Amino acid sequence: MFPEDTKDLALLANRDISLTAPLAFEVPTSSPKLPTSLMKTSWVRWVILALASIINSALNYSSNNPQALQPSIQAVFGIEDAKFNLLYSVYSMPNVLLPLFGGLLADYIGVRFAVNLFGFLVFIGQGVFALGAYNENFQLMVVGRFLFGLGGESLTVTQLPLIAKWFNGGELAFAYGFAKSAVRLGKSANSFFTPKIYLWTNSLSAPLFAGLTVSLISLISGFILCQFDKKADSEDALSLTKETSSADKRKIDWKDFKSFPKIFYLMLISYACMFAAFTGLSNALNKLLVTRFGFDVNFAGNLVMLYYLISAIAGPFVGLIVDNYGRKTQLMLIITLTLFFTDLFFAFLQDGSHQNPNYQVIFPLIGVTVFSSFYTILFWACVASLTDKKRIGLGTGMITCVSNLSQTILPLLLGAIHDKTIDTHFGYFWTLITLCFIVGIGFFLNYMIHIEDNKNKGNVKLFKEESKAAYDMQSLTSITENENQLQL
């Protein structure tokens, strides 16, 4: 039953909706008025979401350039999968720890500074990557990917608190879904345009310099976004993230790490497995379609673009479903099984040839599309339900660090397995079986999350109205704390 009056809201607050918060939630006798920006009535929030989406789209266009050019890069430099996958491992390597500090920046210093800083690192990294291709210097390309990685994941992390600030609990999944749609549009555009630019120019550097132009658009969008957010804060005396407010600049307390509940850490490890497994599949998708199933590079790029495009279109609708449908942990189990059987289907499909491509590949591609449409939106909606607004940056930073640790190791492992088993289905059979095993671990962890959620009275299963009430309670509590600190 949804809360419909103040009494129900008080009961909801006493359930300790934010499992992470060590604070005692008390309902104020006279509720202070929420800031107008946080009431989300201003058109500015849609500008913020649009700019964040442009950043996400541009970031993922550039970061996925190697995936669209894998056959070409390997041909130009004469390298095997294990060495090629360095371009992914060095991207993830700095993000084993860096997003944690990106999250801390978002929580304690301010997202505006972080967005501009990490956007600049992305731009510089893409420039070095493109110069490496222009000079046919693979080592310089690796350096560029490392620099890109210094900013890429942290740029994503620092945007999440901004979106959480402008969209309340009952709309978070929709907002995240919209932002994630932009991610997939960027990936889709990369899969479509990058191979074509290479074919048009017969130059490996040309599509990467195009990615540099897109990174510049991301950098400019980040600057404009920060100006809008800064202006909104200056007009909102009670802004919860106002960077000039002494109430918001509390010192880093490392005890915050202990404030997260058991279910959060289960989700953290689960995400590391699931996202690494999915990324391992999607990074190899273009070459898998070309090498094993017999499609030409252009057609394979169109297939991958189509799956990204469908995922992008579905994103906002998936967000609405997640917002309005409880039982998020059950949905998580279903989506995990979807990826498991998708990998299994890919593994046992018959090989194709350039004369006779295997069009049955469309069926596992549908599974990839369904998983891509649901999983990330569903996961971050669960995280938002579990994390109080003061620690959402820290929480997302922790999750991103652990997932990048797995993504640093897994590409090297998959590349080694591929090269060692190259005579068995072009090296992809045991690679896909390995991914099935990792997804199986993720399914077990997600089942543990489901059990733990039931023990905690289903806090992750909140419906839209309940999520909004929980968000409002956190906002009210934070405002009261800020007012008290200012009075002191």
Image (cartoon, helix red, strand yellow):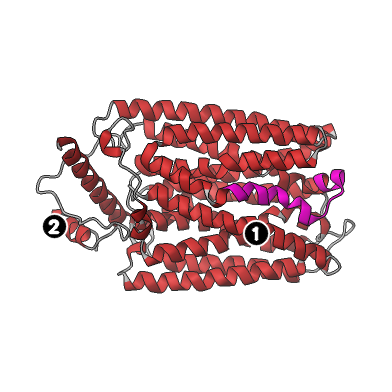
In the rendered image, residue 202, in percent from the top left (x then y), is placed at 85, 35
Magenta stretch bounds: 73-94
Give yes or no for residue 88 being in the magenta stretch.
Answer: yes
Is 156 placed left or right of 414 in the picture? left
Calculate the distance from the C-alpha at mark 1 to the C-alpha at mark 2: 51 Å
Q: Amino acid at mark 2?
A: Lys
Q: Residue at x 35, y 25 (%)?
A: 231
Q: Would you say 386 lies left or right of 62 here? A: left
Which comes before the other along the chain, label 1 or label 2?
A: 2
Q: Give above or below for 419 relative to 307.
A: below
Q: Quadrant of the N terminus?
A: bottom left
The secondary element bearing badge 2 is classed as: helix
Q: Position of residue 328 (x, y in %)?
A: 41, 63
Residue 122, magenta (yes or no): no
| Towards the viewer: 219 or 196 | 219
Query: Do we see residue 276 in this rendering?
Result: yes
- Residue drawn at point x = 66 percent, y = 60 percent: 410
Q: Which amino acid, by three-letter code, is at mark 1?
A: Ile
Q: Main secondary structure of the magenta part?
A: helix
Residue 7: image tag: 2
The quarter holding residue 5 reads: bottom left
- Please tell me in which quadrant of the rendered image residue 213 appears: top right
Q: Residues within 10 Å of mark 1 (few under 14, many from 20)?
A: some
Q: Is residue 395 left or right of residue 479?
A: right
Farthest-out residue, right:
355
Q: Is residue 461 left or right of residue 336?
A: left
Q: Secondary structure at mark 1?
A: helix
Q: Which residue is mark 1?
A: 409
Q: Position of residue 60 (x, y in %)?
A: 61, 42
Disc number for residue 368 = none
* Residue placed most toward the observer, 365 or 117: 117
